[in-house]
């Protein structure tokens, strides 16, 4: 029975590691300037966690194989070094890992959260509401007009609650259902929640940030590859949560300018 | 600390009549079994809900015969709607976390065995004890009621994030009375846990028998003691959080709701609240809750392993101190659930370090288990197999925590199936393995009959391989960016991952079905099992020094005297390779 346990555990541990080692499931391609730091941190952690996982499982299998249902009268033995060895090993191995990962990981985090966006970053506002994202570009005047929640009228396309009748700044704001951005240009996304918590997640961008009602949050990023990518909501927001998505369209600067002109004329 | 406390008398009269014996019983053993029974009902309900979820994920348009009888709006014609999927998910999480993972390993086994293991006749406050169970039972009924109201159960997940959970019916189905029932149920549950935790602490401090010093208490007694201290602080925060949520919902306050929210085309009449306040309060409870579920299992598994290795741990003290460290650190880590929540990014780094550090005591415990297995004489019965399975799961679930403790990686993995895989392995499955190990180990004492070992082993093999087949692939899905809490992956970048979901669902059906082997074994053995001797495992702790099942006053009016710690295995005693705690013989 001990040998069976050991064999099955070994098989399970190796089978669990196989898809990781062979890269069957990996993160989709990274299209951001900061994402490589996250990916490196993830793969370093994977190496250390994989070592700990396989090491512990195989040791467990080995000891159960060796020390199960022995003949009556077999004396028990104690591991040389005893508890002190175990405590020292845990402190040295894990302690080093904790420090290394903790310290190294700071950089990847800091790249996203502790660096201010550049002065010339393109500001786009995103509003999340049950169950759609909308995006707003400031238009010719370069200013976002103030929002008035009481003026939200989705039936007439006033998703953000702009005061089009009285506010001159509002009239040139460009509102879209798709997030188009120029490639290789820093974007600062200003995040506004209309109703409940939502989240902005683009796998390829390595960005995930919640929208929180009542809080002005922003993230900034630079996309390095043109293409169309899905934006999904990752914060449970109600019955249509699974269907709340939009597209990120990374365009060349010329295509982006053209797209923005077209959208402006449609407003 | 080493001073023994002599038990004073806290004896209630022998129970008479059916009601006092089996329903409103003051006997900690009956109460322990009641908690265990409630957890058993809850776990099978929770499992059935997970089956429905797994079914819907891979066959979204296929009918589940009869489900429309439970909810004609949630499953019209038997086909689960996306919102009903969220209801099933919310109820699954709530039932499992509160009514299974808190009830069984802590309140269930703890109630039954903590007093006996310290040589007490009952808990310090038997009436509080009875009340704590019945309060919990009422909480359960209130929660289940949500299935039968027209609006249906809540859809905001077991974490009930505000403002979704706070604004009422405008936010969607299940968020009217369903969500209120949820908050009322959890508030009541907190009261039960607070009463229970106080009782555990008072009992451990005051009712230890002569010679039972702290360091002579078995590791599982220590685990229940430490857990009760965590529970006392954690539920004391969740209770007011739920009350504030109810006030927001019913009294028009705005603790968690800011101004300017437009929901269902209506500007909400609230201002000044903070959604993040709910998250802080909830996770201040929520993370320690993980340890409320897992520490008793760590204790139970250590107890089972020591008995079946026929040797002591390399150091019981180190395990106990490590559990205390985990308990202490558990108060400084809740923010790791909120890395991308909008919380200040500096706080994220502050929460990351204690989270990574908690790996050290957890690793020490694991290495002590592994190192103790070296040179052991392992008796591989069903209890041992589940204990060894627990060690394996504890490692698997632990290493994935290493990823999520780092805010930078969490940007990518947060809210994906990686998280679901992580907490199911370490908090769900590992704790369940601990409960199952404890059940196979203590069933003879609790019922006076042995469980069927062949069925037990069959149950183990299917469950062990099955849970790996279910929860390991969750991690792969997460790495590929598969988002959690979605009721469907159609027309989506996640569609190519569907074959993995199918594999997981099939594994879940098989593994779930294997739990009926356990249920059959449990019920069959209760009535038809072989008579259990007093000490079938040749164990040393006090519960094995009294008849199976124990009399109502545990020790038959005697007060046991303790001469040893409970780790006297691999010695030359008069009964074999062990000496019991209450045996005066020298070793």
Image (cartoon, coloured by chain):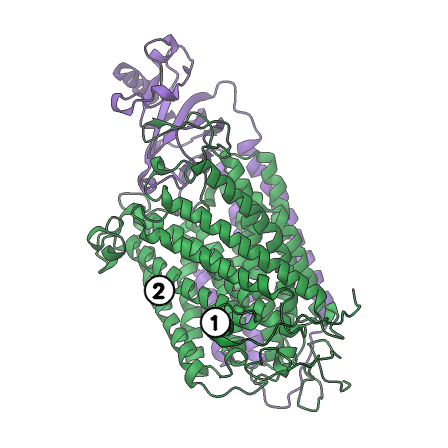
Name the residue nearer the viewer: B502 or A163: A163
Residues packed near mark 1 inside 10 Å, few (<14), some (14 to 19) or many (20 plus): few
Name above or below for residue A251 compared with residue A8.
above
| Disc 1: which residue | B19
Residue B468: quadrant of the picture: bottom left
Residue A25 visible in rendering: no
Q: Is residue B345 above or below residue B362?
A: above
Q: Answer yes or no: do the residues labelled 1 and 2 have beta carbons within 8 Å?
A: no
Residue depicted at x 45% and y 65%: B38
Label 2 chain ID = B
Nearer to us in this view, A107 or B536: B536
Q: Which residue is mark 2?
A: B507
Kindly tell me whether residue A32 is visible in this rendering.
Answer: yes
Q: Colour of chain B?
A: green
Instruction: Judge the density around disc 2: few (<14), some (14-19), many (≥20) Cα neighbours within 10 Å.
Output: many
> What is the C-alpha distance between the residues marked 1 and 2?
43 Å
Q: Image point 70% across, 84% down: which residue? A: B579
Which chain is represented by purple in the image? Answer: A
């Amino acid at each position: 029975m001990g040998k069976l346990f050991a064999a099955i555990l070994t098989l399970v541990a190796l089978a669990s590691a196989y898809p990781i080692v062979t890269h069957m499931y990996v993160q989709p391609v990274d299209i951001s300037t900061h994402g490589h730091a996250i990916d490196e941190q993830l793969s370093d952690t994977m190496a250390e966690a994989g070592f700990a996982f396989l090491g512990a499982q195989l040791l467990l299998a080995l000891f159960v194989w060796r020390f199960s249902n022995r003949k009556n009268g077999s004396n028990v033995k104690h591991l040389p070094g005893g508890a002190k060895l175990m405590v020292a090993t845990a402190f040295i191995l894990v302690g080093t890992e904790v420090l290394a990962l903790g310290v190294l990981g700071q950089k990847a985090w800091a790249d996203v959260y502790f660096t201010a966006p550049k002065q010339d970053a393109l500001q786009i506002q995103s509003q999340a509401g049950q169950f759609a994202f909308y995006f707003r570009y400031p238009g010719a005047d370069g200013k976002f007009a103030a929002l008035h929640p009481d003026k939200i009228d989705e039936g007439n396309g006033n998703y953000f609650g702009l005061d089009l009748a009285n506010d001159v700044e509002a009239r040139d704001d460009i509102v879209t259902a798709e997030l188009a951005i120029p490639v290789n240009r820093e974007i600062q996304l200003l995040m506004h929640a209309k109703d409940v918590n939502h989240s902005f997640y683009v796998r390829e961008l390595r960005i995930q940030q919640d929208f929180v009602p009542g809080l002005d949050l922003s993230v900034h990023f630079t996309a390095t590859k043109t293409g169309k990518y899905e934006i999904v909501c990752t914060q449970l927001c109600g019955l249509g949560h699974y269907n709340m998505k939009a597209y990120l369209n990374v365009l060349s600067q010329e295509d982006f300018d053209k797209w923005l002109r077209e959208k402006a004329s449609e407003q | 600390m080493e001073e023994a406390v002599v038990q004073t008398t806290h004896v209630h009269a022998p129970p008479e009549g059916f009601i006092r014996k089996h329903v409103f019983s003051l006997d900690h053993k009956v109460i322990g079994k009641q908690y265990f029974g409630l957890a058993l009902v809850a776990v099978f309900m929770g499992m059935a809900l997970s089956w429905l979820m797994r079914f819907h994920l891979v066959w979204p348009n296929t009918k589940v015969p009869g489900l429309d009888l439970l909810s004609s709006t949630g499953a019209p014609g038997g086909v689960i709607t996306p919102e009903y999927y969220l209801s099933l998910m919310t109820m699954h999480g709530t039932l499992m976390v509160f009514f299974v993972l808190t009830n069984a390993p802590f309140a269930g086994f703890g109630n039954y065995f903590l007093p006996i293991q310290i040589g007490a006749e009952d808990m310090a406050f038997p009436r509080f004890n009875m009340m704590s169970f019945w309060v919990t039972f009422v909480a359960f009924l209130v929660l289940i009621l949500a299935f039968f109201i027209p609006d249906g159960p809540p859809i905001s997940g077991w974490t009930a994030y505000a403002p979704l959970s706070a604004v009422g019916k405008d936010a969607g189905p299940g968020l009217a009375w369903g969500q209120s029932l949820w908050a009322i149920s959890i508030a009541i549950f907190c009261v039960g846990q607070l009463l229970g935790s106080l009782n555990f602490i008072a009992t451990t401090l005051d009712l230890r028998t002569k010679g039972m010093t702290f360091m002579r208490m078995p590791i599982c007694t220590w685990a229940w003691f430490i857990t009760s201290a965590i529970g006392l602080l954690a539920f004391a925060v969740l209770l007011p959080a739920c009350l504030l949520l109810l006030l927001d919902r019913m009294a028009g306050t705005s603790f968690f709701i800011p101004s300017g929210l437009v929901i269902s085309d209506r500007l909400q009449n609230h201002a000044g609240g903070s959604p993040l306040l709910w998250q802080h309060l909830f996770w201040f409870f929520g993370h320690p809750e993980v340890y409320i579920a897992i520490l008793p299992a760590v204790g139970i598994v250590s107890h089972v392993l020591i008995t079946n290795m026929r040797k002591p741990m390399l150091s019981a003290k180190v395990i106990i101190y490590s559990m205390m460290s985990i308990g202490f650190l558990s108060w400084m880590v809740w923010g790791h659930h909120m890395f991308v929540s909008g919380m200040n990014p500096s706080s994220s780094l502050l929460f990351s370090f204690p989270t990574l550090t908690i790996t050290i005591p957890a690793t020490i415990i694991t290495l002590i288990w592994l190192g103790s297995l070296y040179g052991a004489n392992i008796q591989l019965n069903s209890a041992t197999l589940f204990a060894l399975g627990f060690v394996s799961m504890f490692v698997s679930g632990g290493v994935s925590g290493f990823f999520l403790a780092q805010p930078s990686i969490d940007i990518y993995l947060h809210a994906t199936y990686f998280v679901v895989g992580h907490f199911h392995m370490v908090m769900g499955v590992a704790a369940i393995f601990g409960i199952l190990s404890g059940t196979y180990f203590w069933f003879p004492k609790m019922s006076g009959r042995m469980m069927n070992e062949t069925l037990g082993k069959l149950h183990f093999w299917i469950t062990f391989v099955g849970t790996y087949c279910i929860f390991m692939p969750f991690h792969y899905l997460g790495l590929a960016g598969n988002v959690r809490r979605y009721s469907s992956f159609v027309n989506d970048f996640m569609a190519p991952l569907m074959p993995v979901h199918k594999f997981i669902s099939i594994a879940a059906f098989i593994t779930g079905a294997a739990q009926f082997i356990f249920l059959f074994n449990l019920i069959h053995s209760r009535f038809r099992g072989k008579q259990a001797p007093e000490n079938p495992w040749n164990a040393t702790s006090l519960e094995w020094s009294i008849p199976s099942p124990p009399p109502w006053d545990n020790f038959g009016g005697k007060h046991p005297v303790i001469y040893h710690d409970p780790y006297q295995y691999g010695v030359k005693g008069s009964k074999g390779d062990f000496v019991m705690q209450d045996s005066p013989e020298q070793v």
